[in-house]
Image (tube, grey):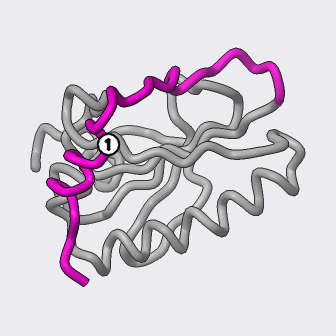
């Protein structure tokens, strides 16, 4: 897509601090990091989100994530890592191009993903039934 910011990075039209690249994915520093070393891993082909991307691309992104995660821990930038796919606006996806956040974390860094909620009596069973996938 011509106006996609991530596609522009892939084409070299916008600079990025690249940390990993192979034939399917590209990884670079996020310009507004949660913590130093926050990396985005993107597909080189344009897919709007996680659910539209082929399994092969998601697998390649996951393999890159493991390599990058190990490097983050070895570098001392984090003592743990949060990996996140945001899928859709309500989930926080801002750029309509499949991407994975790799965020170095340290104890007490102040970043919180969510506060857990409890199910009402019987609610968990009803939801599980709706989401059950035949094996």
Examine the structure image and report whether residue 120 is included in the region drawn in magenta: yes
Residue drawn 60% across and 25% down?
A: 34
Examine the structure image and report whether residue 74 is included in the region drawn in magenta: no
Whole-percent x, y for residue 54 in the image = 21, 73
Q: Secondary structure at mark 1?
A: helix
The magenta span reads 107-135
Whole-percent x, y for residue 65 in the image = 56, 62
Residue drawn 43% across and 50% down?
A: 100
Q: Farthest front residue?
A: 121
| Label 1 crowd bin: few (<14), some (14–19), many (20+), radius 10 Å | few
Q: Farthest top residue?
A: 110
Q: What residue would you read off at disc 1?
A: 124
Secondary structure that dominates the magenta span:
loop
Whole-percent x, y for residue 116 in the image = 50, 26
Quarter of the figure that contains the C terminus: bottom left
Residue drawn 55% across and 48% down?
A: 83
Nearest the camera: 74 or 122? 122
Whole-percent x, y for residue 3 in the image = 13, 38
Nearest the camera: 99 or 121? 121
Q: Is residue 38 left or right of residue 1?
A: right
Measured along the vertical axis of the image, is residue 98 above or below residue 59?
A: above
Quarter holding residue 56: bottom left
Residue drawn 19% across and 57% down?
A: 129
């Amino acid at each position: 897509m011509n106006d996609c910011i991530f596609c522009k990075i892939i084409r070299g039209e916008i600079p990025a601090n690249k940390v990993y690249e192979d034939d399917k994915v590209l990884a670079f520093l996020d310009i507004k990091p949660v913590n130093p070393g926050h990396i985005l891993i993107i597909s080189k082909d344009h897919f709007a989100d996680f659910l539209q991307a082929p399994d092969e691309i998601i697998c390649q992104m996951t393999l890159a994530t493991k390599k990058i995660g190990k490097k983050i821990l070895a570098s001392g930038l984090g003592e743990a890592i949060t990996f996140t796919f945001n899928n859709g606006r309500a989930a926080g996806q801002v750029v309509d191009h499949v991407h994975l956040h790799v965020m170095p974390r340290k104890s007490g860094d102040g970043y919180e993903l969510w506060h857990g909620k409890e199910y009402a009596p019987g609610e968990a069973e009803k939801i599980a039934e709706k989401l059950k996938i035949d094996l």
